[in-house]
Image: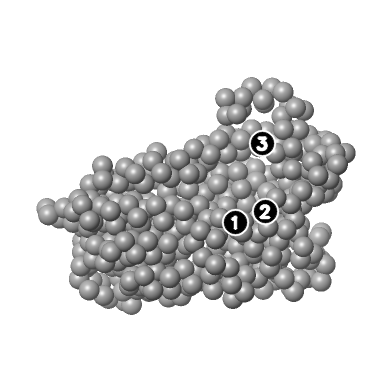
Amino acid sequence: MDVSYDVIVIGAGPSGSTAARFAAEGGCKVLLVERKRDIGIPVRCAEGVSEPPLKEFIDSHPSFIRNRISEIRLFAPNDIAVVLTPVNSGYILDRRVFDRELARLAIVNGAEVATSCAAIGIKRLDNGTVDVKVLHRGSETTVNCKIIIAADGVESRVGRWFGVKTVTTLHNTEGALTYVLSHPEIDNRYCDFYFGTEVAPGGYLWVFPGGDHSASVGIGCAGDCLRGKSLHEFLDRFIQRKYGGAKILSEVAGGIPVQATLKEIIADNLMLVGDAARQVNPMTGAGIINGMIAGKIAGITASESIKMRSWKKDDFRDYPKEWHQRIGSNHEKYFKMKEVVNKFSDESLNQIAETINSLPESKRTLRKVFMTALIKHPLLLGELRHLF
């Protein structure tokens, strides 16, 4: 590493690598640091993305696509399945390969990458720049920069170092547990979602097939809805019921912030992206594409700021503004929708599934599911009327 850079990006997930790529493409001297030894490992993600928005950033390639999905099934608490009308096809990624490819694109565009490199502190200097203390392969060193892009995940410390309020509530943080397992009855055609208080209280359980009868099977639940039980209890019970005898290949746990984007995602010398900025879809917990969109905007904003030779908070205003226009305003709606959906009882979810299945297949859309839910619960419509 050199001793000074224009931009240091902390965290080499999809949002961080994308930010580094576009900042470097804009002419910045960029360092991308990742505390883990290997980018993309361990995988803390269900690895599902929609195909169309991915094309903005990278061409699909068999090396990082494990499976292609065209259909989605929603399972009510009584196991009634609703097969939704396909809208867009999607991919199940191999995040280990995918994340490395995004980092490679950052390098191709001029960024430097340092793995086994953890940011452990910052110090603002009188000249308006920032010293970043890093622990690189066991040795402490200091690297100077003008702008930090923090992509250090849900547990982000960087934002707090700059005085940004990143605290979230237990209700708005879903615990997540995922197994990769193998079983002959996994249907590789469908992404499945299971709902109900006995399956995933305050959240949902998913089965994302990766091909060859393997799948990422996981659960995400609001922290205040588990009723004293663990995620392992819910997930193990489901697997025993649906895929008895399955062979578990790996296990990973983490947290998902399911709230609207933080009110402040910028400060002097700083922009937050991805999970660190709470840019995950609050309804679904999906964050890969969102993080890449935020990373691109932040990277371009950083390059423009460097050209203007100013990196104050006001110089970054275009970033949250553009994020809000593209996705952030919808996340505010999704957050309110999540709060309403979580009020549905198991009986109501079963009735909604029966109603949807009485419709012609061409009308079984996600929008129709939601509108049917509101029709059956008109009192909830009042809570959401201002969103439409």
Q: Is residue 300 left or right of residue 283?
A: left
User: Is 33 drawn above or below residue 268 in the view shown?
Assistant: below
Q: Which residue is mark 2?
A: 88
The three-letter code of the residue at mark 1 reads Pro
Tag 2–tag 1 contact (CB < 8 Å): yes
Asked whether residue 383 appears in the rendered view, the answer is: no
Q: Residues within 10 Å of mark 1 (few under 14, many from 20)?
A: few
Q: Secondary structure at mark 3?
A: helix
* Coloration of the structure image: one colour
User: Is 170 drawn above or below residue 63 in the view shown?
Assistant: above
Q: Which residue is mark 3?
A: 341
Asked whether residue 300 appears in the rendered view, the answer is: yes
Q: Which residue appears farthest toward the left when viewing the image?
A: 126
CA gap between label 1 and label 3 equals 27 Å
The three-letter code of the residue at mark 3 reads Val
Say which mark, if any, is on residue 310: none
Q: Quadrant of the N terminus?
A: bottom left
Q: Earlier in the sequence, mark 2 or mark 3?
A: 2
Looking at the image, which is closer to me, 274 or 321?
Answer: 321
Looking at the image, which is closer to me, 256 or 145?
Answer: 145
Q: Residues within 10 Å of mark 2 (few under 14, many from 20)?
A: few
Q: Quadrant of the C terminus?
A: top right
Residue 247 pos. (x, y %)? 74, 73
Residue 354 pos. (x, y %)? 85, 39
The three-letter code of the residue at mark 2 reads Asn
Question: Looking at the image, is mark 1 or mark 3 nearer the viewer?
Answer: 1
Q: Residues within 10 Å of mark 3 (few under 14, many from 20)?
A: some
Give the residue at x 29% y 51%.
270
Q: Which residue is mark 1?
A: 52
CA gap between label 2 and label 3 equals 23 Å
CA gap between label 2 and label 1 equals 7 Å
